[in-house]
Amino acid sequence: MLKLLSPLISSNDSIHLKVLWIFLLCLSTGDDSQRESSPFLNTDHDEEHYYEGKNMALFEEEMDSNPMVSSLLNKLANYTNLTQGVREHEEMVKERRRTEVPQMGTFIGVYLPCMQNILGVILFLRLTWIVGTAGILGSFAIVSMCCICVTGGSYYMISRSLGPEFGGAVGLCFYLGTTFAGSMYILGTIEILLTYIVPTATVFKESEDAQMHNNMRVYGTCCLVLMALVVFVGVKYVNKLALVFLACVILSILATYAGVIKTAIEPPEFNVCLLGNRSLKNEKFETCAKTEVMKNNTVTTELWSFFCDSKYPNATCDEYFLLNNLTEIRAIPGLLSGVIRDNLWGDYGKAGKLIEKNNLASVPAQDTSNEVNKPYVFNDITTYFTLLVGIYFPSVTGIMAGSNRSGDLRDAQRSIPIGTIMAILTTSFIYISCVILFGACIEGVVLRDKFGYSVKKNPVIGALAWPSPWVIVIGSFFSCCGAGLQSLTGAPRLLQAIARDGIIPLLQVFGHGKSNGEPTWALLLTVGICEIGILIASLDAVAPILSMFFLMCYLFVNLACAVQTLLRTPNWRPRFKFYHWTLSFLGMSLCLSLMFISSWYYALVAILIAGCIYKYIEYRGAVKEWGDGIRGLSLNAARYALIRLEEVPLHTKNWRPQLLVLCKLDSDLTVKHPRLLSFTSQLKAGKGLTIICSVLEGTYMTQGNDAKTGEQNLKAAMAAERTKGFCHVVVASNLRDGFSLLIQAAGLGGMKHNAVLMAWPAGWKQVPDSSVRRNFIETVRETTAAHQALLVAKNIDHFPSNQERMKEGTIDVWWIVHDGGLLMLLPFLLSQHKVWKKCKMRIFTVAQMDDNSIQMKKDLQMFLYHLRLDAVVEVVELHDNDISAFTYEKTLLMEQRSQMLKQMQLSRTEREREAQLIHDRNTASHYAMNDKAAGTTPDRVHMTWTKDKTLNERNRHREGMAVKDMFNMKPEWENLNQSNVRRMHTAVKLNEVVVKKSRNSQLVLLNMPGPPKNKKGDDNYMEFLEVLMEGLDRVLLVRGGGREVITIFS
C-alpha cells in the first residue's frame, strides 16, 4: 500500500499528509484477509506484550486489531520521512538506502523559489509596455487583481479536497499551464537573444514581422531541445544553476531601483527623436535633425534619406516630414520631472497605430499611404485592457513553487504559508512600485515602445537601469532560461503524479520513467506540447493561453478552501489562522472574472477541456476515495433536500415509481434474475429512486460476510445492467421478516420507495412447504397496508435486455379496476426507453351486459386524450354465462390438492409426485371437457373498471348463485366453496379473453387481484393468479398503492 501511495506522497505533498496516510494505515480495520499490513506496526510481534498487565484487560479483544495508543505514538515518533523530491533522484543513484531528513527552511525552501518564479520575463520585457499602454492607474488595477487571485495550493490539494474528477481535470489544466509557461519563457529567451544580444543572427530574410516569427520558431525549437536534454541528463544541473539564475534576477531588480534613484540626481543620456509628435526608430541614425553643418556646409543627415528620395536638399520628401520639425527629448526625464501626470491614463490603439506624444502639436499630412515604410514606431498588436490582463497574469503564477517543494522542508506546515505570503507581499510590492516608478520616470512614448526601438533598440527597463542596460539584458536572459528549465522540470513530474494516481487510465504510460524515477515519457509529451506554444512564435499570444489554465487552477484551489471551511470538515484544521472563507470566495470570483476578461474564447476552450477531462474521469477513471470536500458537499445537499421533501406532500404531477426491487440471490450469492434489474432500468431510465435489496436467512454474526459478498455482487449486476440506484442485503431470521423490514424501513426521510417490484415465484408448486406461497401473499398484503404499489413480473427471464430492441409489437394494458392510473403510467414510462420505444400501447377494458360499450370506448378515448397518451382503445364484452364444468373441475382439483397437503405429511419426493399428478389431471380434464364447456353458459363475470359496478356485481352473484347451477352439478361438486368457484370462473374467463387478444403482444399489464381478507383462502390465491396468467409469456401484474398517480394537468 505504501508503494502505491509513495508517488502521491512526494515532493508535492507536505509532511503532515504523509503522517496522516500512515496514521490511517495504522488504524485501518476490517477483515483479517483484507487488512493491509503497516510497514512499521507489526501486530504479530507486539500482540503478546499487549496483555501483560491487567489494567487494559477490558480491551484485550480490541487489541487484536487496534494497537495501543502508546505503541502507535512510539512508532510515529520513530518514523523517518524519506525525501522524494526532484533533488533526490540523482542522489538515489549513488546511495539508494540512505534516508535524509529535509533541511530547507522557509527562506531557502519557499521564499526564494517563489521569488524566482514570480519575477521573470513579464517584468523585464512587458511591464513597461503595459504601464505605457494602460497607464499607471490601469496597470495598478491589473496588478492588484492578479495578486488577489493567486492564493492557493497545488494539484494534491485540489484532488483531495474536491475529488479525483476535479483534481484530475484541474491538475491537467495546471500541467498544460506549466507546459505553456515553458513555451513562454523560451520565447522570451529567444526574443532577448535576437532583439538585444545578437540581432544579426537571423536565418530568414523576409518582412520584419514574418522574419521575427520564423526566427523565433527555429531558435525556440533548438532552445527547447537543448533544455530538454539538460533536464533528461539530470535535474541536479538545473538545481545547481537555480541559484545563479536567481542571483541574476535579484541583481537586475537592484539595478532597476538604482537607476530610478539615479534619475533623481542625473537622468540617463538616452534621447528620443520625434518628428512632429511621432516617435522614430533611432537605431540607424545618430543625429535627430534634417540637416547639419559640417565644415561650414549644410548637409543632410542620415534621417533625411529615410523620408526623401535623395540626399540632396532639393529632393522630393515625405509631406509630413516637410511640414513638421524634429524634436529631441529625454527618454527618461527622471523621478522629479513630473512626467507621472502624463502617464496616469492609458493610451490603447489598434495594430499599426503610430506611437505619438499626445501633448505635442503636429501638422497632419494629406497623404498617409507610405507611412508604413518610414522609421516610425508602431503598435505591433491591437491593445485593450483585457488583453493586458491576460499578458500580465503569467507573472504571478509562481506562487506554488514553495508548495511543490513541501517534501523538502523541515516544517512544511509553518514554512509554506509564511514563505508564500511573504513572497506574494514582496513581489506585489516590487510590481506595484515598478508600475509607479516606471510611470514617474520614463516618457510615455518610450513606455509604449515595446521593443525599445526609440532608445537605440535597448530594453526600456534597461535604459532606466544602472550602471548599464546590459545588466537587464543578461539578467533577463538568464532569468528566462532558468524559468524555462524549471517549467520543463516541474511539468513532467506533475503529469507523472497525475498518472500514478491512476484516475486517468489514458495517462498510465506517463507514470513510468527511468530507474531513478525520472519521468522520461512525461518529459517527451511535455516537449511536444511545449513545441506547439513555440510554433505560435509570439509571447503575447502564448501568455493568455497559460493564463487560462492557471486561472482555472487557482479558481478551484480557492473553491477547495471555501468548501472545506463552509462544510466545517473535521479534518480541515489549517494552522494558519488569519483566514476567512470570504477571501477564498473573492479569489474564486476574481479568477472566473479574469478568465473571461482576458479572453472569453480562450476561457470557453479551457472550461471545455476541463469539462471533457472531468467527464472522462467520471466515466472511465479509477474509483478513488480521498475524503474529498465534494462528497461532504453532496451529503449536506442531500440532507437539505431530504428535509425539504418531508415538509410538503408529493403532488400527483411529480409522482413517479420509486422502486424497491426485491431480488433473490442463488446459492453462489449471485443475482438469480438479472433481467429484473434490466426491467428496472428500462422502467426508471435512471430517474428517481431505485433500491435493489435481497434477504439472507440467518443471523448477521454468522452471515455478515455473505451479506457483504451479496451486496458486491448486486453492485456488479447493477453496473452490468446499467441500473442506477442503491443496493442492500439484509440478514433476517427468515425471508418473511426480511421482506417486511425492507418494505417498512427502506429509504430515508422523504426519499422512500412507493412501489415494490418482484419476480413471480414460478416454482411455488414444487416447493415441499408453503413458505414461498406465504411469503409472497404476505408481501402483497404488506405493500397494500403500506399504501405502496406492487409490480409482479411473470417469466422475468424472458424480458428483453437493455441491448435488445423491440422492433414492433404492442404493450397491452388490461384495465379491470381503477388503480389510480398506474396501469396507464407504466407503459408510457417504458415507451421512453429505447428497448420499448417502437411498441404501441393498447388499452383493453371489460364491459358487461348492462354497460354501453360504445359510450365506454368514447369516454376512455376522451380520458386518454386529456392524459395526452397515445393508445388504441378496445372494449371487451363478457356476457352472462353459466359456470363451465371445466371451472368446477379445476376448482375441485385445487381444493383437493390443498386438503391433501394439509392433512398428509408427505416426504419431499411424494409431494413432488403429487403435484405432478394433479397437474397431469388438470391438463387432461381441460382437453376432455373442452367440447362440453363450449355448449354450457358460464356464469357472468363480476368485474368492471369502476368500483360501484364491482360492488353491484358482487351482490348479484350472492343472490343468484345459490340456485343457478345446482341442477347441473356432479355429486363431488356440491361441497365446493362457491366463493372459490366464482373466483376460478373469473380467472378462467378473463384468461380466455386476454389470451385471445394479447397472445402475441410484447408485454401484458394486468390488474392484480388482492388476496382474500380471510387468510383461509390463501391456499387458493396463487392458483387463481396462475390461471389468470396461463398461456401468456411476459406479464406484469400491477396493484396500485391507493392514490392517484397520473393527472390531466401538466
Image (spheres, rainbow, N blue to C red):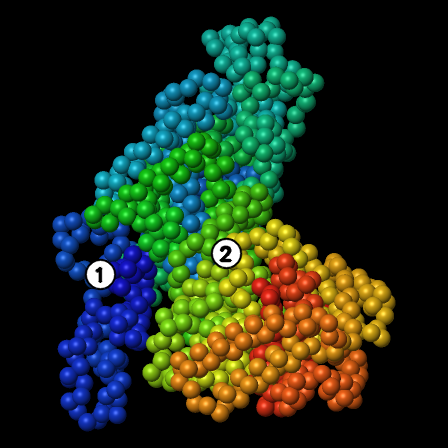
Identity of the residue drawn at 78% across and 69% down: 877
* Rendered image: mark on residue 203: none
Q: Residue at x 54, y 76 (%)?
A: 921
Residue 80 in the image, given as x and y percentages of width and height: 20, 66
The C terminus, quarter of image: bottom right
Judge from the rendering whether residue 110 lies leftward or rightward of residue 803; answer left or right. left
> Looking at the image, which is closer to me, 299 or 734?
734
Q: Is 957 displayed left or right of 832 in the figure?
A: right
Quadrant in which the N terminus is drawn: bottom left
The type of residue carrying mark 1 is: Leu
Residue ranking furthest to the bottom: 54
| Mark 2, secondary structure of its residue | helix
Residue nearer the viewer, 643 or 80: 643
> Label 2 belongs to which residue?
555
Q: Residue 535: horizontal and vertical position, in percent? A: 43, 31
The structure residue drawn at horizontal position 58% and vertical position 37%, both measured from the top left corner, is 383
Label whose residue precedes the other's in the sequence (1 or 2): 1
Report how far apart the C-alphas of labels 1 and 2 lie in the structure.
32 Å
Is residue 322 visible in the rendered image? The answer is no
Residue at the spot 41% in from the left edge and 25% down from the top edge: 215
- In percent of width and height, residue 818 lies at 73, 75
Dot 1 corresponds to which residue? 82
In the foreground, 854 or 638: 854
Mark 1 neighbour class, 10 Å CA radius: few under 14, some 14 to 19, many 20 or more: many
Is residue 851 rendered to the left or right of residue 376?
right
Residue type for callout 2? Leu
Q: Nearer the viewer, residue 251 or 657?
A: 657
